[in-house]
Amino acid sequence: MSDRISLQQWNRTLLQRQHLLARVDDDAVEVLDRVVGMQSQDPKAAFFGLHARLENFAPDELDDLMIDRETVRMALLRSTICLIDTEDARWIRPAVQPALDAELTGTHARKLVSATPAAIVDAARGLLAAGPIGGDDLGRELAQRFPDEVPATLTRVVRCALALVQVPPRGLWSGSGKPTYSLFDDWAGPGEPALTGDDARAELVRLYLRGFGPATVAAIQMWSGIGGLKPLVEKMEADWELEKLTGPDGETLYDLDGLGLAAADEPAPVRLLAPYDHVVTAAADRRRVAGEDALNAIKTTNGLMRGLVLIDGWLSGTWSLTRPGVNVELFGEPDRAQRAQLDTEVQRLREFAVS
């Protein structure tokens, strides 16, 4: 019989692995590797995500990683723009390509009037061979070749089919700009994926559990965008690489063998997470950090998301930057100690935002 884990212990273990119980004084790239990158559809989100996890994080550290091409922003897991270590992206992108292919054929290709995806991708390769090109320009150039099609649809076809990096200044703290794309190998340099096939999928399972475990198979699949992982996970468990746990409601959870769990009574300080932080947004097991009412409260009609507030380890509100500083909206009233922690975090974020 597998050991049972309580909801509180599950919560604390997730926060511990995400460096949200205590900030660490490490390099930004090390933390990015441990938490498997960060969602980056909001160009500044990764900066706020690292600020919540690192003791002495300066924005120019991450700027330098992007400018030096050690990290990249690109469509990756779940077709979401992620900021991730460049060499990890080199093997993860091919591993998740089937999910991107399914998006292409199931959504974007159906909107085409007369062009074929193959012809569009071939034309895009020719345009990208000349160097980085703006997303709007790419759509317009392709529309000249395929006048029956909507430029945005053409760009989405290419984004799914080709490994494209959103190059700086897009995504920098010190700059901004509309999406400009380069082929991955042109930007990062040619190379072969370190892992392929089941080896790559198994490594994705390991990475997820190291940063987010214990977890259900459904959560691993939702995060990665790859279905059909249950046989692989069960094989890894049979090979003693993974251990099986029982969740608070009897669900089957998997974890890396010997990684250990946090104590249920571990204190969880207030943290101001980035918009779209993957602790909340990229897991089928979100109830380990957010109740249903809180999850409903952060939904918006336009799909945009404010920053997220954790109090005692649970989603408890949202935040946004304003001209005077930081505006916080809570779903309930914190106690005096939690209010003091919140005030400290708000001041810390205010100072960071103007750095």
Image: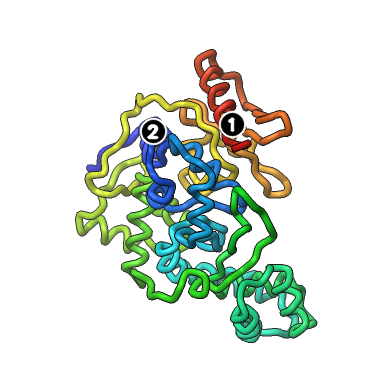
Front residue of 141 and 59: 59
Foreground: 336 or 12?
336
How many marks are shown on the rendered structure? 2
Where residue 219 sits in the image (x, y, percent)?
A: 44, 51
Can you say whether 309 is above or below 218 in the image?
above
Residue 252: horizontal and vertical position, in percent?
34, 47
In the drawing, does residue 210 fall left or right of residue 123? Answer: left
Q: Residue at x 32, y 49 (%)?
A: 254
Instruction: Report the quarter where the C terminus lies.
Output: top right
Under tag 2, what secondary structure? helix
Residues packed near mark 2 inside 10 Å, few (<14), some (14 to 19) or many (20 plus): many
At label 1, which amino acid type do we have? Glu
Which of the two residues, 159 or 58, is positioned nearer the viewer here?
58
Disc 2: which residue = 12
In the depicted structure, whether residue 299 falls above or below residue 33 = above
Q: Looking at the image, is mark 1 or mark 2 nearer the viewer?
A: 1
Query: Residue at point 52% right, 75% down?
Result: 186
What kind of residue is marked 2? Arg
In this orientation, which residue lies closer to the viewer: 216 or 279?
Answer: 279
Q: Quadrant of residue 198?
A: bottom left
Q: Earlier in the sequence, mark 1 or mark 2?
A: 2
- Location of residue 142 by image quarter: bottom right
Q: Which mark is residue 351?
A: 1
Secondary structure beneath dot 1 equals helix
